[in-house]
Image (cartoon, rainbow, N blue to C red):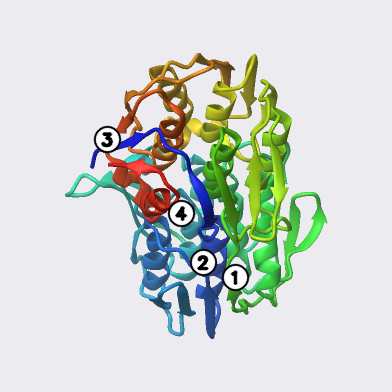
Amino acid sequence: MDVTFRPAHLTGIAAAPASKSEAHRRMICAGLTHGETVLTGFTESADMSATRRCLEALGAFLKLEGDRLTLRGYDHKPSLLPLFDCGESGSTLRFMVPIAMALTRGGVFRMQGRLGQRPMNVYRDLFVPRGALWHMSVGADGAAELTVSGTLQPGDYTLPGNVSSQFVSGLLFALPLLGQESTLTVRPPVESASYIRMTVQALIDSGIQAEALDDFSWRIPASSQYQAPSGSLHGDWSQAAVLLCADALGAEVTVAGLSEATLQGDRAILSHLKALGAEPVQTDEGILVRPGRLKGVQLDLSDCPDIAPILALVCQLAEGESLLTGCRRLRLKESDRLSATVKLLNDLGGRASEDGDSIRIKGVKQLKGGTVDCARDHRMVMLAAAAGTVAESPVTVHEAEALDKSWPDFLPLYRRLGGIAE
């Protein structure tokens, strides 16, 4: 689906969609609970559907009515080596592999898009020496398939901290299912620490006593049992960042439903925009960012890489030079998001370049329009949509349906706020 975004002024109040990071974690805790959990404020997307399918493969029951998701954890022993359709969701895949090894002796994990190319060697190198069988293949329809066969054993585990935090979270979810004491230690330096803290908090909220032995080291006692609570989901700061950055460039959108007490690392969008010269304001309706005189800065995005593309747009229209560091993991997303961001900005008349695993940006006064390559990446489509509001002429993207991965209602909301998307 081709979509053209035309210059327009966004204004109004918008509710942030539910946090994907929080929803993944709370759904999994509920799916591992012997009882019923109700999550409200739920936002459906392709990634959420992937986690729902995988929990159903484990024997859980899930029912979605509007924004109300009811889950009943698995109440019977699941079949061995079930099929887990992970779609393009890296979180789903990496969370579910050790859980499946704990409950079903593994499984067959199907992957779409670039997910089959994203690294899994951390688990392979951890589990194969402990007796697991590991085989990557291609299904009849061309989708990548990972078959893992083996039982997760209790014990002492150590993971490197300079890889995706999703591996750490996956083990943290699985170890309480083993009925014996285990420990998990993450070697520094630890990237995406906020995501690990979110997982630990979800476990604690669900009755799992993850005893901190040190920074990023935990003991999981033998008596652990999931008891996930019902409740509402918080808004997603990474998605809200698109609208808040549009504000910094002249829009007037107040974003509702965001909690400043959240553990989401993407909440750093406020401090980053402030460093650039914009002014975040808390109103009765939500959070609004007032534009200011934007000046280039150096920002470390190692704990919040998902907001790098939209922040790069703001930096591109700031005076002087900006440097976004800590962007290494952007290369392993739905696209090589680091390269895709640089190319998109330059195609619109920007002056961006790759500097190792950083993005260097020299500010320009105005962006032009044109057709840009979003690499079938939902966050790149959102970047193009925001750029389209302030460019000299329309910005056109192909395969805008990539938005379904995380925010299917983005285009209707964009239009309600005054955006022109044709």
Q: Secondary structure at mark 1?
A: loop
Judge whether 34 appears above or below 95 on screen.
Answer: below
Report the disc number at residue 132: 4
What amino acid does circle 3 point to? His
Asked if residue 283 lies left or right of residue 139, the reply is: right
Using a 10 Å C-alpha cutoff, classify the residue at mark 1 as few (fewer than 14 neighbours), some (14 to 19) or many (20 or more). Answer: many
> Disc 2 vs disc 4: Cβ atoms closer than 8 Å?
no
Q: Pointer 2: what residue?
A: 102
Q: Name above or below for residue 222 compared with residue 153.
A: below
Q: Secondary structure at mark 3?
A: loop
Q: Is residue 379 above or below residue 185?
A: above
The earlier-in-sequence mark between 1 and 2 is 2
Residue under numbered circle 1: 178
Kind of element beneath mark 2: helix
- Answer with mark 2 or mark 4, whichever residue precedes in sequence: 2
Left or right: residue 76 compared with residue 222: left
Mark 1 or mark 3: whose residue is earlier in sequence: 1
Residue 286 left/right relative to 216: left
Name the residue beneath numbered marker 3: 398
